[in-house]
Image (spheres, rainbow, N blue to C red):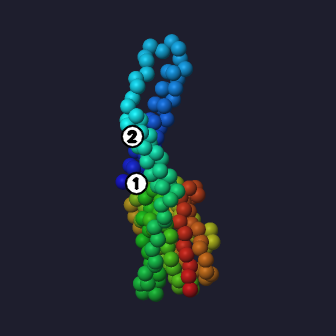
């Protein structure tokens, strides 16, 4: 659903830019066969507000939305969280406790080659993720802080927050 909204917002912005460029070209071209039609001011305002709202929605979508976070749950002495890999990582921020084993269960649904691998450089872990299967990634964090992880190409990111 998020991808669909992003695509629709991008198309709307693109159409608005192209149509305004075409109108400007027609004004500057003296040999144009078509004459511009005067539009009521309310229509102009409505179109401007619609375009502005699309731009604001796009900015919020890509820059303002907060990452989804989840605290790991203890199960038989191991902290566990399932992370869905579908156009990114959900949750993208996982909170765990220091000194206790962690098992992140990566469920890869996205077939793109970028998400075939997950890298944890601070924990020296690189793991291939099988499509439509859950792949465990295990490590034990020894220090406090926030540690980044990413896809094999570095385009999608997540983080592990290690607390006391």
Mark 1 vs mark 2: in front: 2
Q: Is residue 75 above or below residue 121?
A: below
Mark 2 residue crowding within 10 angstroms, few (<14) / some (14–19) / many (20+): few
Residue at image coords 38%, 37%: 42
User: Do we see residue 1 in this rendering?
Assistant: yes
| Residue drawn where x is 51% and y is 79% of the image | 96
Residue 82 sits in quarter:
bottom left
The residue at 47%/71% (across/down) is: 69
In which quadrant will I find the C terminus? bottom right
Q: Position of residue 99 (x, y in %)?
A: 57, 85
User: 54 or 94: which is nearer to us?
Assistant: 54
Q: Are marks 1 and 2 in contact (CB under 8 Å)?
A: no
Residue 131 shows in this picture: no
Label at residue 147 = none
The location of residue 159, given as percent across then percent down, is 55, 69
Q: Which residue is mark 1?
A: 2
Q: Earlier in the sequence, mark 1 or mark 2?
A: 1
Q: Secondary structure at mark 2?
A: helix
Q: Is residue 60 above or below residue 48?
A: below
The residue that label 2 is drawn on is 46
What is the secondary structure assignment of the residue under circle 1? helix
Residue extending furthest toward the front: 41
In this rendered view, identify the residue nearer to me: 19 or 74.
19
| Vertical comparison of 10 with 20: above or below | below
Direction from residue 119 to residue 68 in the image, left or right: left
Instruction: Locate residue 131, reporting x and y percent.
Output: 42, 59
Identified at 56% across, 56% down, the residue is 155
How many residues crowd mark 1 within 10 Å: few (<14), some (14–19), many (20+)? few
Measure the alpha-carbon separation of dots 1 and 2. 25 Å
- Quadrant in which the N terminus is drawn: bottom left
Q: How many marks?
A: 2
């Amino acid at each position: 659903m998020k991808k669909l909204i992003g695509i629709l917002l991008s198309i709307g912005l693109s159409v608005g830019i192209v149509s305004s460029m075409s109108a400007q070209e027609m004004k500057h071209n003296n040999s144009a066969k078509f004459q511009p039609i005067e539009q009521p001011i309310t229509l102009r305002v409505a179109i401007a507000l619609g375009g502005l709202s699309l731009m604001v929605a796009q900015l919020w979508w890509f820059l303002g939305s907060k990452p989804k976070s989840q605290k790991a749950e203890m199960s038989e002495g191991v902290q566990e969280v399932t992370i869905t890999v579908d156009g990114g990582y959900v949750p993208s921020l996982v909170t765990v406790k220091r000194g206790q084993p962690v098992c992140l269960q990566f469920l890869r649904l996205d077939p793109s080659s970028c998400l075939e691998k997950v890298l944890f450089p601070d924990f020296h872990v690189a793991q291939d993720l099988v499509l439509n299967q859950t792949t465990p990634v295990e490590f034990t964090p020894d220090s406090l802080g926030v540690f980044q992880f990413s896809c094999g190409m570095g385009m999608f990111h997540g983080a592990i927050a290690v607390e006391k």
